[in-house]
Image: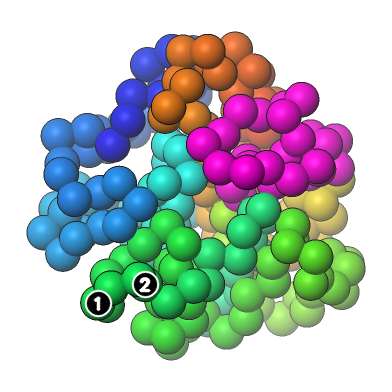
Amino acid sequence: MTDVYGHQDFFNKIKDLNIVDCRDLDGTRCYLDDSAKATILSRIKDYSPSGIHFIDSGNYHYLSLLWLSKIKEDFNLVLLDNHPDNQPPSFGAITSCGGWVLEAKDTLPNLKNVYTYGTGDEIPVSDIPTDLPLYISIDKDILSKDYCISDWDQGEMTLDEMIDILNVLLKNHQIIGVDICGDSGEMAEEAAFLNNQTNLTLFDFLSVNF
């Protein structure tokens, strides 16, 4: 994994901070092999899926699947992403950043519905049923380049629009946890200032309202 947060300091504001360092692992870039998956699951075994999880670039968005696998009650997933991440793997039954949502649907019996925003096929956020708690997964590549620099093609959402969506979700639903990816590993230093500001804004909003 990359060192995207080595150039940022937003996390210095987080009092109850736990860092799970996986930079020593091979078999993690875009695809997660079984050995690396077992190691990461071991490293997060004592952590709850609740809270706010920052998980590096979109190449590692599959880490959301590992957090979801720890949820022991029925729930819905809300995904804010410029990509649906529901593609079958190119080879074998391997976990991938582009297919983890499909894997979650196929393997997690407690996951009942997935509501995706950013790919053009979405219901109004206010119409998401309130009967089940939500887990929210954010890939910042849904944002325009005015607010984020990622390693993937990006959408046109503004940060204010994202905050508006999150505000509706947090007001109307029980939230289990939130994760955030979409930093740039390839341009970690050049993107640091902009991505740090967006991470800080999201953390400040979520920590007050979540």
Decide: marks 2, 1 in contact (CB < 8 A)?
Answer: yes
Pick whichever, 86 or 49, lies toward us: 86
Residue type at mark 2: give it. Pro
Residues shaded magenta: 138-162
Q: Which residue is mark 1?
A: 92
Percent of width and height locating residue 92: 24, 77
Quadrant where the image shows the N terminus: top left
In terms of secondary structure, what is the magenta stretch mainly? loop
Percent of width and height locating residue 154: 68, 42
Specify whether 30 is left or right of 124: left
102 above or below 145? below
The outermost residue toward the left is: 35
Q: Is residue 156 visible?
A: yes
Specify whether 86 is left or right of 123: left
Q: Quadrant of residue 188?
A: top left
Specify whether 124 is left or right of 179: right
Q: Which residue is mark 2?
A: 89
53 above or below 121? above
Residue type at mark 1: give it. Gly
